[in-house]
Image (tube, rainbow, N blue to C red):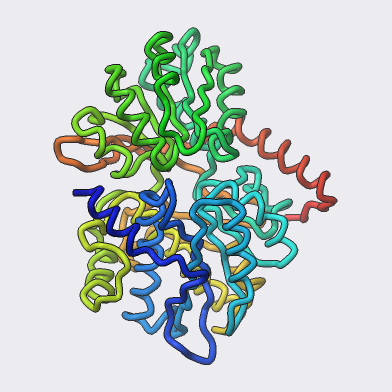
Amino acid sequence: MMFKRLTGALIGATLALPAVVSTASAYELVIPSLDYRTGPYAPNGIPFANGYHDYLMMLNERDGGIEGVKVKLVQCETAYNTKQGVECYEKTKDTPPSRALVYQPLSTGITYQIIPKASVDKIPVHSMGYGRTSAANGKVFEWIFNFPATYWDQAAVLVKYIGEKEGGMDKLKGKKIALVYHNSAYGKEPIRTLEKAAEKFGFELMLLAVDHPGQEQKATWLQIRRERPDWVLMWGWGVMNQVAIKEASSIRYPMDHFIGVWWSGSENDVLPAGDGAHGYLSGAFHAPGDNFPAHDDIKKHVYDKGKAQGERDRIGEVLYNRGLIAAVYASEAIRNAMKIHKTKEITPAMMRDGIESLDLTEARLKELGLPGFTIPVKITCANHAGPRKVALQQWDAKAKKWSFVTDYYDTMNDIVDPLIQEDSAQYAKENNIKPRDC
């Protein structure tokens, strides 16, 4: 049933560049949405794009927009292709009646390519939990944000979790941890962190690359069956995740020792493996499910009015909720920018100020209809990565749902912070950037 619905969604997806969702007015808040509803990664791109769209559309329908100003959502199809994503950026950055306020590239490759462009154009980029990890250093990356946590933070937390399960970090010595990763800039992001952790805690790190799009993994899992690592981590996306989980199940690898990055932890990733996916784990920074008041408002103001782009029974899926929280961050930064600059007609530079001083508290999340949905986020000039905390969720194949199985862990600052400083300093040197005084 899931695949029938996905097929229908793919057939119905528009390829127009760009498609605009708005209501005409003298001034509107222009927010591009770099979607991928086509191509091998569409099953993951579609629910994220729907969640992003639906929350902003709900604000338009329920509240008349943000502080009474309509959102003009400009959708552009990237197909998860870096070149096409850069073209989308160029096509949408000067959309009338104002400039684009913020970009969510939803691709590490696209993010890397538009970082220098957006920095010159002075348009903020929010690569939420992905992209270039060292953009966490706001002193160097003035226009780039990656809160609420980075890939390096997540890698560190997954090692922490493994250490906890093994009975203490000292018990990691002599253990073998494999990383199955998408052979791209995205998939390679955690390697440096894991190498540093391996040096510190004495475990052996196996690196197993999987080429795009990830459908052929027989050799990878034969190697895992042969060497039998104690734990397997995965930095995958799209069909790669589905194939990996099915292959792991076929060799009877213990699923409670198989952990994916938060981009490898959606319903699309586990359902194809059936009962074989039971117990599989992934990182997380927001709750699954549709049992929040904000979801009720989306159903009432978007789906009941026939203004949705997705299917009602997919509201609350992990990646739908990820698109939703991305839209929450954008809309709350807009409110903050309006308050700071005492105007409802904000510029990208004002939007940057709104993001850099964002303080999304638990009380505010409750007001938004999302109590306990995610952790509070506070951004500063120096810290563009926010709280940098990560939780773990686990798949219950019988109930067909994800559930949190841990609290939020702090990152390993002693490992991650020096890497961020080193990488951001190198970027500043290569690009003649004088770090800001924060």
When the figure is inspected, residue 308 is found, relative to residue 114, above or below; the finding is below
Q: In this view, does 378 lie to the left or right of 399?
A: right
Q: Is residue 213 left or right of residue 256?
A: right
Q: Which of 159 and 58 is in front in this view?
A: 58
Task: Classify residue 59 by image quadrant.
Answer: bottom left
Residue 189 x, y percent position in the rendering: 58, 36
When the figure is inspected, residue 94 is found, relative to residue 106, above or below; the finding is below
Quarter holding the C terminus? bottom right
When the figure is inspected, residue 288 is found, relative to residue 244, above or below; the finding is below
Residue 24 x, y percent position in the rendering: 46, 89
Q: Is residue 333 left or right of residue 365?
A: right
| Residue at image location 67% in from the left, 34% down from the top | 419
Q: Which residue lies furthest to the bottom in this view?
A: 26
Residue 87 x, y percent position in the rendering: 62, 62
Q: Nearer the viewer, residue 438 or 277?
A: 277
When the figure is inspected, residue 69 is found, relative to residue 102, above or below; the finding is below
Q: Which of 131 and 347 is in front in this view?
A: 131
